[in-house]
Image (cartoon, coloured by chain):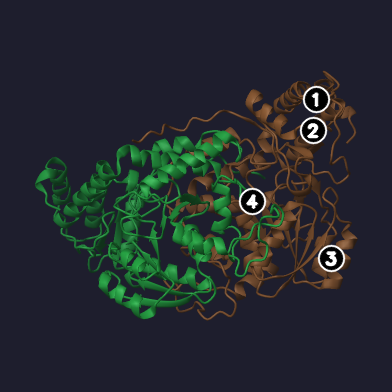
Chain colours: A green, B brown
Amino acid sequence: MFAFNEINTPLRTIMTPGPVEVDPRVLRAMSTPVLGQFDPAFTQIMNETMEMLRQVFQTKNRWAFPIDGTSRAGIEAVLCSVIEQGDRVLIPIYGRFGHLLTEIAERSGADIHIMECEWGDVFDQEEIINEIKRVKPKVVAIVHGETSTGCMQPLDKIGPACRALNVLCIVDAVATIGGTEVKVDEWQLDAVIGGTQKCLSVPSGMAPISYNDRIEQVINVRKKVEKGIATEDDLLDVKQPIRSNYFDLSQLQDYWGPRRLNHHTEATSMLYALREGTRIVLQEGLKERFERHLLHEKALVEGIKAMGLKLFNDVPWKLPMVTCINIPEGIDGESVRMMLLRQFGIEIASSFGPLQGKIWRIGTMGYSCRKENILFVLAALEGVLIRHGASVQVGQGLQAALNVYELPHLIVK
Amino acid sequence: MFAFNEINTPLRTIMTPGPVEVDPRVLRAMSTPVLGQFDPAFTQIMNETMEMLRQVFQTKNRWAFPIDGTSRAGIEAVLCSVIEQGDRVLIPIYGRFGHLLTEIAERSGADIHIMECEWGDVFDQEEIINEIKRVKPKVVAIVHGETSTGCMQPLDKIGPACRALNVLCIVDAVATIGGTEVKVDEWQLDAVIGGTQKCLSVPSGMAPISYNDRIEQVINVRKKVEKGIATEDDLLDVKQPIRSNYFDLSQLQDYWGPRRLNHHTEATSMLYALREGTRIVLQEGLKERFERHLLHEKALVEGIKAMGLKLFNDVPWKLPMVTCINIPEGIDGESVRMMLLRQFGIEIASSFGPLQGKIWRIGTMGYSCRKENILFVLAALEGVLIRHGASVQVGQGLQAALNVYELPHLIVK
């Protein structure tokens, strides 16, 4: 009756906006035998990971640790720990993941105010700042890199404006962390959520977050230690306790901090993966890593254009690690994607909502963001488009990309 | 400035009630290169895992899938998806994890009714059934195996009583799944949460759950699809939407079911681990696996007793995979644990609340539950106790355990 074999997966070239290929060193780190959660050898790994995350987030924040869940778990942990019933939250939406922020904040009891722009645009920062002044929210929650549209919202003025107006600024940097600048301290962002399965090239399943003492003050007021492990010093009568136990940052602080109070059992192997992933990021160097992402983006974009295709996000606010291509008139986008997967083992993405069926999205993130992948996807896309009867400039895509690689200094970004 | 090396952990003998040693085959499975979440090769792995989980849970339930978080994430997903504001929930508490159920249910808005017994006891099932009749709750939430006290609550009559009284029976089987019988269908349990890092010998970070159509009915009424991806057929006006997006089982059903509606990005490598872990359980055979847990428990218990130590949980309701030892008068329990770790690389556990400092807990779970580990922990414990000036029957522990291994048929359980 029992009939399942050992796992045996095909090897793919993953060029989506996540999850992307995992660095082989991270895969190996995950096969390390586990340690108990309070073993000193393990708590040292926890501390090292916190220190490396601080460097990746470019922050001096005390708190920088992962939530044991996927990226949206990190978002929910921050929002539900900060938002109390009726708190006013302003959410500027420019794609699907702005809607997700709304969705999560709403379930946390927020009084939501949204601003929306066309998918493909971003906001002028002044426009958001004016709306903050008008709405006077407790929190502004905003996406930094919107993978659904391939756009990136500048934040360098929004953060300081929030600080000046005493508003908390919470940023979804799931797509951008480790791939482009996310200057938590310089931009004065109060809480930031990163993703593992994108530019960090770690599998999905953890969400590194960082937040400052402004956020911590809000959280600590709501702190409620579990009855099974509370001591007499712990307040048990809390006005608005955080609605989630699992995502309760005040308890997670006691687990990641020196008190080491039992909460969940840390996801050992995923932490090994995150530690190795952040180590590799820092070993490569943030600047060098961001430049690598730009180089391969450039090669891909030049190749796509030379092929005769048009970019959906050929705009100054293009998200550097996501390139969106308008599906040519008369071509079945899903059929192209399927042929790429079945014949070439290459995965690219479609999109959501108003953009469904209109664009393909190609990710150039983390370990997937390397020369041979760019060249392979360009060659394969040309081949598949020809088989679909599309008109392409045969052979031009690869040549344009090779030009970028051979003469990167001649190409002005 | 950058100074962290590759991960380099000591190899431990982990004899706690979790997390325990991970089967090497599971560790290898985790180093498999990842797939995209909607790759047909990956959705097949999702389906296979669901099928194997059904067999491990001994159920024909349609829904059996993991929550991407640690065990308490699974508990919170079930409780917060089922419990609406003001719902009456009865929770019998016989240790720390009963308190955790209270904690989570309370934050979900439940009107909590508790029953408590001494730590070390369990409830007579009739006592609980009478309380169900009196309180008339919507939900009974109860722990099957309480690792904090090493006790196991019989459920075979509580489940059918709940069914007859139209009460939902939700069971925390985190410690027992894969190590002893958890007969979801036969005992008529409506929802069950398992743990990975205990008898399944998979790292912490996923929580397999299963639930039946009685639970599904409650959940479906609260279903609210995210605005960014909802279609016209999806109700957007829901009376009491589930308070969590991440733990919303109604959305998770659409992700694990044929609609494959995007929710989180499944934790790829952890799913590989869970698939391999459940595969190994079924390959060994449930019956054979439970017998193996009993055999090694027997050897450990006989060894501990022969050494002259007393069990805290030498009771008919002993949890087979957790053996609790009374710390002898005048011995510093933490010092013993530290010496075991530092000199022998062996980890055993202390306990919580009223039992803190009073007992040691030794787990015999999953891959950690094997002959060489039992013999090593007995030998090491004897050595360490002698160094702490305790009076022990020198040499007797190992001999008693070896007797069990050489003559298992002579030992009556």
Residue type at tag 1: Tyr
Q: Are marks 4 and 1 in contact (CB under 8 Å)?
A: no
Residue type at tag 4: Leu
Residue type at tag 3: Ala
Question: In 3D space, how far apart are the residues under numbered discs 3 and 4 (Cα atoms)?
Answer: 25 Å
Question: In 3D space, how far apart are the residues under numbered discs 2 and 4 (Cα atoms)?
Answer: 25 Å
Identify the disc placed on residue B161. 3
Q: Chain ID for label 3? A: B
Residue at 59 percent across and 74 percent down: it is B222
Residue named by callout 1: B405
Q: Chain ID for label 4? A: B
Percent across and percent down for residue B287 are 76, 41
Residue named by callout 4: B53
* Helix, strand or loop for disc 3: helix
**Who comes first in sequence, dot 3 or dot 4?**
4
Which tag is nearer the camera, tag 2 or tag 4? 2
Residue nearest the viewer, comparing B86 with B226: B86
